[in-house]
Image (cartoon, coloured by chain):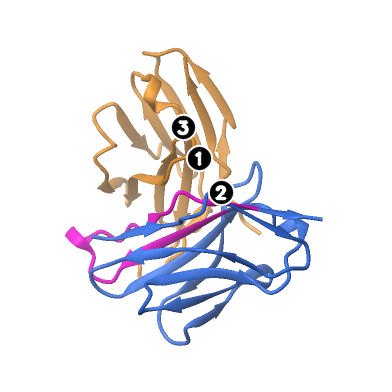
Chain colours: A orange, B blue
Amino acid sequence: EPEVTQTPSHQVTQMGQEVILRCVPISNHLYFYWYRQILGQKVEFLVSFYNNEISEKSEIFDDQFSVERPDGSNFTLKIRSTKLEDSAMYFCASSHSQGAHNEQFFGPGTRLTVL
Amino acid sequence: AQSVAQPEDQVNVAEGNPLTVKCTYSVSGNPYLFWYVQYPNRGLQFLLKYITGDNLVKGSYGFEAEFNKSQTSFHLKKPSALVSDSALYFCAVRDTLPSGGSYIPTFGRGTSLIVHP
């Protein structure tokens, strides 16, 4: 069964450093998403991406964040200058469509720790 | 606006007993409701969804959920729990009247289900 994969599984970085989180969505999916979950809190939507552009983003997704689909398979989330409060679990997801019946397929997550 | 609440951080149940994981929601229109499960070191996996029709929805691994419009609830249930059901469970809701055209579901904070042998 096809799966969404994410690398690395755990990333430790110093405050102020740039990080890139990588995701490989399911191959025939067209919509891609990033979510995050701060420990003990809700899963929060960050951004959705379709047709090589951002289709929606939340207020969390500020200028420090960017997304890219550099080739036909990878989908990346970049945090330009990490802050302590960026420490969280980051989930990538993909879906074939964005309709009402849509369910998203999630990767295993990347745990980001900012020191 | 749409929101979802999972009032229990943790649910403990003995193997073989029925389990319930609670979820309540708030939407402006009609809800689309989802349950996902997350096993350790894995991503969220889709379990089941309610879009319309029968209030009792059956999903993967023997789970089912009952949509109750008057109580705005969508509790996840299983008649007989297994130790292997121990995981983190997330409820999600999407409004049929998306504010600003958003199709993004809102997730709850998750409920940890622990099934004791």
Residue B95 shown in magenta: yes
- Circle 3 SS class: strand
The label nearer to you, 3 versus 1, is 3
CB within 8 Å, label 3 to label 1: no
Q: Are marks 1 and 2 in contact (CB under 8 Å)?
A: yes
Query: Which residue is the extreme one toward the right?
Result: B117
Side of A4 where A42 appears, left or right: left
User: Which chain is disc 1 placed on?
Assistant: A
Q: Single out the mark in the foreground, 2 or 3.
A: 3
The residue where tag 2 is placed is: A4
Which amino acid type corresponds to the residue marked 1 in the rendered image? Cys
- Is any atom of residue A98 visible in this view? no
Task: Check residue B96 for magenta coloring.
Answer: yes
Residue B60 in the image, given as x and y percentages of width and height = 64, 69
Q: Chain of mark 2?
A: A
Question: Of the residues under marks 2 and 3, which one precedes in the sequence?
Answer: 2
Mark before the other along the chain sequence, 1 or 2: 2
Residue B59, image x and y in percent?
60, 73
Query: What chain does mark 3 sit on?
Result: A
Is residue B111 or residue A29 the one in the foreground? B111
- The magenta stretch spans which residues? B89-113
Mark 1, residue position: A23
Amino acid on which the number 2 mark rests in the picture: Val
Which residue is at a point 68% across and 72% down the rendered structure image? B62
The residue that disc 3 covers is A88
Disc on the earlier residue, 3 or 1? 1
For the residues labelled 3 and 1, the Cα–Cα distance comes to 16 Å
